[in-house]
Amino acid sequence: MEEKLKILFDFLKVNRSYNKNLQIRYYSSIINPHKNITNKIVSLLYNIANTQSQPRIDYLALFYKKIYENIECLESFDRFLSLIVPNAQKNYNSLFQGMKEQSGWGDKTSALFTKSIFHLHNNEYPSELKIWNDVPSKINKNDDFYLPVDSVIISIFNQFNLEQNWNFTSINKQIKQYYSRNDIEVWDDLWFWGFITQMGTGNKRTFEWNENKYWTLQESDKNQESIIDIRIKSEQFLSLIKNNNTAIKIVRTKFSN
C-alpha cells in the first residue's frame, strides 16, 4: 500500500494546478459576491453544508440558528472557535473537532470546511479570498489535518484493497501512516481526479474518463484544449488506480526524472 500511495501522491503533487484553478473559481463564486466578513463565512458554511448527499435538515437548522444567535462570533477565527469549541487551541484540528460537534455536521463536511478555511488563508490563493486575519497560514507540527473522504475517494481505495472496510476514519488513518500536515491537503486533489473518472454509483462504479461529469462541475475549464489535456491526465490517473503495472512503471519513471 505504501508504494501505491506514493505513486498516486506523486501524480497529485505534479498536477496540482488543475484542481487548484477549479477551487479558486469555486471559492470566488462563494466569497466575492459578499462585502463583509459575516456574510462571507455564512455563505461558505451554507455552501459546504449543501455538499452533503443527504443533509440532515432539522439538525442543520439548529446549527444555523446557533450561528445567527451568535453572529458576532463570525468576525474572527478566534471568536468562531470559541463558539464551537471553547478553550481549545487555535488551530485546524480544533476547527475540525469543533465542527464535528455541531448539529448536522459530520466528519467529511467538517473536514471539507476546515480544508476550505486553510485554502483561503494559506497564502497560496488570491489574497482577496481571505476572510479572517487571525487564521494560521501553515499547519504546524502540533496540529492535525483530515482528508474530506466521501464515496468517490472510498471507491478509489476499494480499487486498492476490497477486503478493507474503507471509510473516513480508515482512509485518514492509512494515509497518515506516511503523510502529515500539508501533504494531507495535497491528497484533497484525489476527489477531483476520482470524480471525473468514475461512472455509476455505489459498488457498481466503473473507472473511466467521464466527460459528462466534468461538464457538471460549474467551475471546470470548458475550453476544449483544456478538456483534452485533463482527459490525458485522467488516463494517467486511471492507470495508477487500476494497478496496471506497466503503466505504473512508466509514470513512476516520469515522476522520478
Image: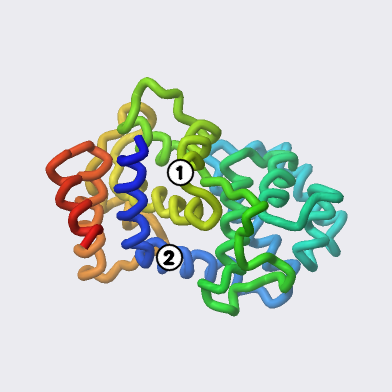
Asked which secondary structure carries label 2, the reply is: helix
Q: How is the image coloured?
A: rainbow
Q: Earlier in the sequence, mark 2 or mark 1?
A: 2
> In this rendering, would 91 be left or right of 66?
left
> 187 or 65: nearer the eye?
187
Residue name at image x 32 percent, y 57 percent: 215
Quadrant assignment for the C terminus: bottom left
Q: CA distance from mark 2 to mark 1?
A: 23 Å
Q: What residue type is disc 2 on?
A: Lys
Relative vertical location of residue 13 with respect to residue 197 in this rendering, above or below: below
> In this rendering, would 173 be left or right of 141?
left
Residue to which mark 2 is pinned: 20
Asked which secondary structure carries label 1, the reply is: loop
Quadrant assignment for the N terminus: top left
Residue name at image x 48 percent, y 69 percent: 24
- Quadrant in the rendering for residue 153: top left
> In this rendering, would 53 be left or right of 151?
right
Residue to which mark 1 is pinned: 178
How many discs appear?
A: 2
> In this rendering, would 215 be left or right of 89?
left
* x and y percentages locating residue 198 in the rendered image: 30, 42
* x and y percentages locating residue 99 in the rendered image: 70, 46
* x and y percentages locating residue 139 in the rendered image: 61, 59
Residue 38, numbered circle? none
Other residues around mark 1 within 10 Å, as few (<14) / some (14–19) / many (≥20): few
Q: What residue type is disc 1 on?
A: Tyr
Relative vertical location of residue 152 with respect to residue 204 in this rendering, above or below: below
